[in-house]
Image (cartoon, helix red, strand yellow):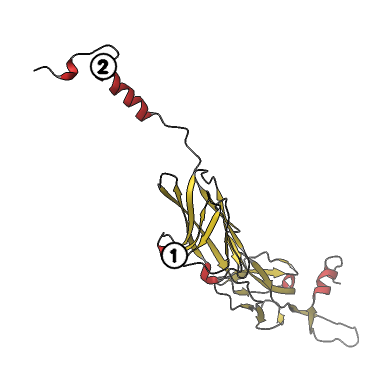
């Protein structure tokens, strides 16, 4: 018995031609659309401020899209849903009353709290009910509080040592040191603790006299401490001799202040 496909009639296409056509159709696809990305604006937000989850390249032909708290699409984590065809939005179980969903896919958070920090998922459903997701993360910070600077001694003899300590309740905050309102340039005589909270100068010299502060910061705020003025005194020995009444060497201590430091730059001690 001959196979029905063995004979070709007028207008029929050979199987080989059909296979080739199918292969070409399978290998061809429309131009790839841009990938959906989400940007947190700003990515580091201060508590009680707002943050916008800004969507880029949202597809036009969507049946619906929804936002979820966390890296999930669980129904109890849904914040809000938008249906483009009807231009309607709906709130979910995770809606707090502080979120606004927009037709361009973006989500606005108002009056952010520390509990809001984390990952959020945008779930998109096209008109053929195919679903894709994109995620974004943002961080929430509390503004830092003012640090307090303390020192072992505000008047120090030259070549002695001094320790300054920056006290702060803000764990993990960045600590910098200031000298006369400028960033402190560390020398080989200065050492910092591992978290920069303690500055030790050993030995101390006249050029170290001046005002010290510490500054703490996080991604959303900066605060400076109280200012401490450090005075340096140094020993000067002078022989006072007279032909009729010789005097023994006399030791005096000079107090180096910020004013004297400026004076010494333009004068020479006699």
Q: Position of residue 264 (x, y in %)?
A: 83, 69
Residue ranking furthest to the left: 1
Would residue 132 appear left or right of 106 to someone viewing this image? left
Lateral position of residue 241 relative to residue 209, left or right: right
Mark 1 lies on a secondary structure that is: helix
Q: Which mark is residue 8?
A: none
Q: Is residue 68 above or below residue 6?
A: below
Does residue 253 appear in this view? yes
Q: In the rendered view of the protein, which quadrant contains the C terminus?
A: bottom right
Quarter occupied by the N terminus? top left
As measured in the structure, the alpha-carbon distance from the residue carrying label 1 to the one carrying label 2 is 55 Å
Residue drawn at x 57%, y 52% is 103
**Displayed quadrant of residue 12:** top left
Say which of 26 and 82 sits in front. 82
Task: Classify mark 2: helix, strand or loop.
Answer: loop
Earlier in the chain: of badge 1 and badge 2, it is: 2
Tag 1 residue: 77
State how many labels appear: 2
Q: Position of residue 250 (x, y in %)?
A: 80, 85
Residue 14, labelled with which disc?
2
- The part of the image, by quadrant, that contains residue 198 is bottom right
- Image check: 192 left or right of 33? right
Q: Residues within 10 Å of mark 2 (few under 14, many from 20)?
A: few
Who is closer to the viewer here, 210 or 96? Answer: 96
Q: Reply above or below: 230 against 45.
A: below
Judging depth in this view, the residue of 117 and 184 nearest the camera is: 117
Q: Residue at x 52, y 55 (%)?
A: 82
């Amino acid at each position: 018995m001959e196979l029905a496909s063995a004979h070709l009639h007028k207008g029929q296409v050979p199987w080989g031609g059909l296979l080739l056509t199918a292969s070409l159709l399978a290998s061809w696809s429309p131009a790839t659309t841009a990938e959906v990305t989400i940007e947190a604006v700003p990515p580091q937000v201060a508590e009680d401020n707002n943050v916008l989850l800004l969507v880029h390249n949202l597809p036009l032909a969507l049946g619906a899209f929804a936002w979820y708290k966390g890296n999930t699409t669980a129904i109890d984590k849904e914040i809000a849903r938008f249906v483009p065809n009807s231009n309607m939005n709906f709130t979910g179980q995770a809606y707090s009353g502080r979120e606004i969903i927009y037709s361009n896919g973006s989500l606005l958070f108002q009056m952010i709290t520390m509990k809001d920090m984390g990952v959020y998922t945008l779930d998109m459903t096209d008109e053929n009910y195919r679903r894709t997701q994109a995620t974004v993360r943002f961080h929430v910070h509390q503004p830092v509080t003012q640090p307090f600077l303390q020192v072992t001694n505000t008047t120090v003899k030259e070549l002695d040592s001094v320790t300054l300590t920056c006290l702060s309740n803000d764990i993990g905050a960045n600590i910098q040191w200031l000298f006369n309102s400028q960033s402190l340039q560390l020398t080989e005589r200065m050492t910092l603790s591992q978290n920069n909270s303690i500055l030790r100068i050993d030995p101390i010299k006249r050029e170290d006299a001046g005002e010290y502060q510490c500054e703490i910061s996080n991604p959303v705020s900066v605060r400076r401490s109280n200012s401490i003025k450090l005075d340096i005194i140094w020993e000067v020995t002078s022989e006072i001799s007279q032909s009729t009444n010789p005097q023994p060497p006399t030791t005096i201590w000079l107090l180096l202040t910020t004013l004297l430091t400026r004076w010494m730059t333009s004068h020479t001690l006699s």
